[in-house]
Amino acid sequence: MRYLWLVPFGMVLGVLGATGASRQQGGSIAGTVKFTGAPPANPKLDMSEEAACKGKYSTDPVVVVSNGALQNVLIYVKGGLPAGQKYSPPATPAVVDQEGCLYHPRTVAVMVGQPLEIRNSDPVLHNIKVVPKKNRGFNISQPTKGMKTTRTFTVEEITIPVQCNVHGWMHANLAVFAHPFFAVSGADGTFSIKGLPPGKYEIEAWHEKLGTQTLTVTVPAGGSATANFTFSAKAGG
Amino acid sequence: MSRAQSEQGRAPRQAARLAIMALAGVLLPPSLAAQDQAALAPRDEAQARGKAIYQKWCAECHGETGAGDGAAATRMLPRPRDFTRATFQIRTTASGELPTDDDLRRVVDEGMPGTAMPGWKARLSPADRDAVIAYLKTFSAFFQGASPQPIALSRPPRQTAAGLAEGRAVFEKLECFKCHGTLGRGDGPSAPTLKDDWDQPIRAADLTENWMFNGGGSVPQIYTRLRTGLDGTPMPSFSDAVEAKVITDEQLWRVAQYVRSLSPASPPRPSDVIRARLTARLPAGPDDSAWAAVEAAYIPLVGQIIQKPRWFAPAINAVWVQALHDGRRLALRVAWHDRSQSPDPAWDEWLARMQRAFPDGDEPVPERQGPDRLAIQFPARLSDDLELPYFLGGNARRPVYLWRWSSQGDRLEEGRGTGLGRFTPAQGEAAGAARYERGEWALQVTRPLEPQDTAAAPAFPAGRAIPIAFYAADGSNGEDERRGALSAWYALYLDVPTPPRVYVAPVLAAVITAGLGLAAVRQAQRRNA
């Protein structure tokens, strides 16, 4: 019982830690990605060589707009995070599925060390080729339906192409972050990034064809900030 | 000392050394902290040696900075390796892992069959090869502190007929044919879309030519490629499929054995002579079963890189030639692997990629696919003169007699050639027919040995070497009458028909001898009587 006097200090530290943690969970950024004007026509797909996928999709969903909302935009904190801060990756894998000879979702993001689960829901051979520059790439095969493969990445890299060589039209975008503050816009164009400490942040929105946009937002302690982006056919040049 | 003891002994010493180095780094200016010079000197020396060797022998293709962009790089397909990405095809490590030093050494020593990379075993000493390997690893930060480990490879099961059949079934289950084709000729439906990590067009391997496999053509080598994949290319690793129990490891060995069985037991040797045996009945066409019994001569072809426009990426690397004659007519059958029946819209994407791959060639790669072509040439006049027409299509002084076949309408033309692409058609008696099947063309040409117009076409005499040469072009690859693959002069030899007196003379001689003998005996008997 020599060190009993340490307990109050421990309790104070614990409370401080807890408030710190709650503050971490508090701040958030939410918004919507919109698209104005006529969206560019997506490339036609001819899957006639693959009986199992033939006719499932007739165009490559590069730019997906519904009711003015733009899907598959990667939004992430680009600047403003405390330097040198380390974040531990979630154990829950991010999932990318191959169905109808397309990737779902088309844009997927993971943290460094977070598992990326690749699934094959098609009864055909897919190979999954990931071609990064900063991470090590790989090229693996999934010859049967239901096969799952998990991989992780070691350094931040935005973005990495994912390809299938059996079906040359298949393309996905993978992003690897050193922090957990990223999201991908859904079918309604919305996204949210949670758990940010208060501060001023540079937020970037990236789309594979339409290019990037940045915004600066201030997240109040425990509160939320809004970041809305609007892309147009011209934006990507 | 046991390994464990030695590890134990090493760890504290290393820690101490690190601590001293860290302290030195803090306390001393960097130049003085350049650590123990004596220990590093030999390494520096080896690296300087590696650099010198690299610059002398490697940089022309692989580039000064190792980016695979040397002066000769744009004339090669596949391109020289870009070392800056540390992506290597031939490894014993898992997909995405770095190669081991032994993996790199094997490629440096033996070269890469089917590419421009030669083996350096005969030219560089072992120390020099080690030095250059150490140097090329400095082009990528990935190698720093890395110690790649080979994957554990199992032992092959004994090859059996049932095993080969299983290998074939697994080949189909894994859909290898998607790229490599049902008969393995590299003509699968995905073949025209294939590109490497540098967006260069890349051909699916023709599995019937194992001597051209980049990583070697033996069963263990094929199995290793199946396990590790060929990084940087579309060929994936199948290790995950084994781990996921989609197939067993033994089944993967069966695939390797089956793939190996698609090639001959040993690489074909070029034949100097194409022999036309005498037959009673000439085959009716390229698929006539009579051809099955006729030996085929292997004639390798190389890209036409002598006259502009030069062509550095030929799609066809050999023709197989068979010949027969019946004393009145000659039949020649030429078969070659071609991944496409040109023009084929599925190959438009390939051609577009070829245009991007060769933007600064002597002439731009054609925008539209032409037909597939095959040309067979003979000297316009057969003389006892030793001088042959220029093998590159002849010239005005010494023209060649040509058979020009095109897949456009399966048309065979006969005429006179005075250089590549310079052709004057003539009315002749040569008839040709071709068929395309799963990555292979086969063409049969038939012509009387004695043409009606001997001024337009040479006669084909039996019993002497008739010079013959070949030219092949794949339209989907951007090839035409001048951009394609060709052979040097070879010889066609028609067996001499056995003349009737060969059979009559011995009988006659026997009869006469017997007659004379009988007469002599009679005379002697009469005298005695």
Image (cartoon, coloured by chain):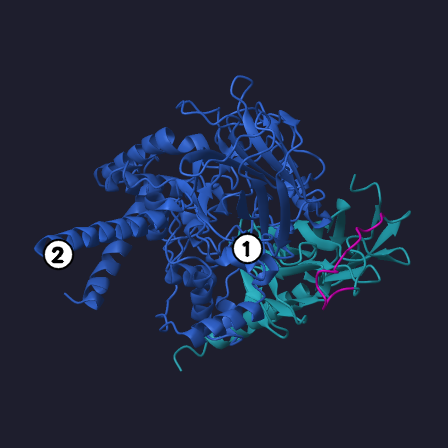
Chain colours: A cyan, B blue
Q: Is residue B309 magenta?
A: no
What's the chain of the residue with tag 2?
B
> Which percent across, then down, holds residue B67?
49, 37
Number of residues whose C-alpha sits closer than 10 Å to that of mark 2, classed few (under 14), some (14–19) or many (20 or more): few
Q: Earlier in the sequence, mark 1 or mark 2?
A: 1
The residue positioned farthest toward the left in the image shown: B528
Image check: A229 left or right of A140? right
Image check: B297 left or right of A108? left
> Which percent across, then down, holds residue A182?
68, 58
| Secondary structure mainly formed by the magenta segment | loop
- Choose mark 1 or mark 2, whichever is in front: 2
Number of residues whose C-alpha sits closer than 10 Å to that of mark 1, classed few (under 14), some (14–19) or many (20 or more): many
- In the depicted view, which residue is nearer to us: B491 or B210? B491
> Which percent across, then down, holds residue B273?
40, 41
The tag on residue B525 is: 2
- Disc 1 is placed on an element classified as loop
